[in-house]
Each structure stands twice: as C-alpha cells, then as structure tokens.
Amino acid sequence: MKTDPKLHALILERIGRLMGLAEENQRKNPSRAKRYVALAGRMSTRYRVRMPERFKKRICKVCSRYWIPGYNVTVRLNRRNRTVEYRCECGALRRFGYTEKKK
C-alpha cells in the first residue's frame, strides 16, 4: 500500500520538526529529546515513510539518543578501515565509510 504524496510530505515535515526539537532539547532535557526521537521513529514506521538518512545517521540505534558530536558522542576516523566511528555514551559503536566504493 502506497502512501498519498501529500501525506508523505506531511509526515516528512513532522519528522523533521521532531528531530529539530530533539536537537534543541538534547542538552537541557535529554529524556524529552529521546521521546521526540521515539515519536519520529514510530511515525515513520506507522505511515511506512523512510526516515531520511540525515536523521538516521544522527540517532543511536541502541539507546535512541540524538547525537551531538563532542557532547554525547565521540567521533574518530579509522584510517585502516576508512570509516568514521561514532561511539555513543551508552557504549554503542557505529561505523560509516567515507570512501566511494569501487565499481
């Protein structure tokens, strides 16, 4: 079942708003920021709308925190694997490659 294009745009807009609120509240009220992230995730699941990648890469999969580099996540470059490593406060580690794949 496909979602209506207007509904799809509305859900993406609301997800963007929730993620913006999560970013604003992460330092002063982390529990509220976590709630915003959870609501955005539930909304994307319920209406079958993919979470935009720019938001997907800013959330911890384990503890659902919104990442702010230098505040609650450590960012390192691994030259051997050519990856960017994000280590959350909860101890979870995520890696994203930074080179283009060979054809």
Image (cartoon, rainbow, N blue to C red):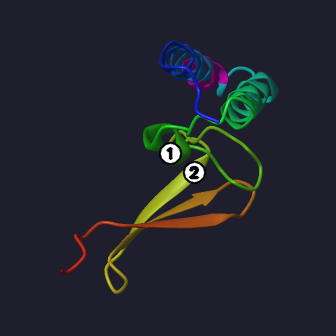
Q: Does 103 sit left or right of 80 as displayed?
A: left
Amino acid at dot 1: Gly
Residue 48: image x %, image y %?
Answer: 65, 36
Task: Work out whether residue 41 or residue 66 is closer to the camera in this orientation and state it.
Answer: 41
Q: Main secondary structure of the magenta part?
A: helix
Q: Residues within 10 Å of mark 2 (few under 14, many from 20)?
A: many
Task: Work out whether residue 40 or residue 49 is closer to the camera in this orientation and state it.
Answer: 49
Look at 71% across and 37% down and name the residue there.
Answer: 45
Q: Which residue is mark 1?
A: 70
Q: Does 38 sit left or right of 78 as displayed?
A: right
For the C terminus, the quadrant is bottom left
Residue lying at the far front of the rendered structure: 1
Residue 13: image x %, image y %?
Answer: 51, 16
Look at 66% across and 33% down and name the residue there.
Answer: 44
User: Which picture quadrant has residue 88?
Assistant: bottom right
How much space separates mark 2 and mark 1, taking CA atoms? 6 Å
The residues colored magenta run 19-25
Look at 65% across and 27% down and name the residue there.
Answer: 26
For the N terminus, the quadrant is top right
Amino acid at dot 2: Val
User: Which picture quadrant has residue 19?
Assistant: top right
What kind of element bears circle 1?
Answer: loop
Residue 27: image x %, image y %?
Answer: 65, 26
Give above or below for 68 relative to 27: below
Q: Indicate which disc residue 95 carries.
A: none
Residue 9: image x %, image y %?
Answer: 48, 18
Q: Does 60 sit left or right of 97 as displayed?
A: right
What kind of element bears circle 2?
Answer: strand
Marks 2 and 1 in Cβ contact (< 8 Å): yes
Q: Which residue is mark 2?
A: 73
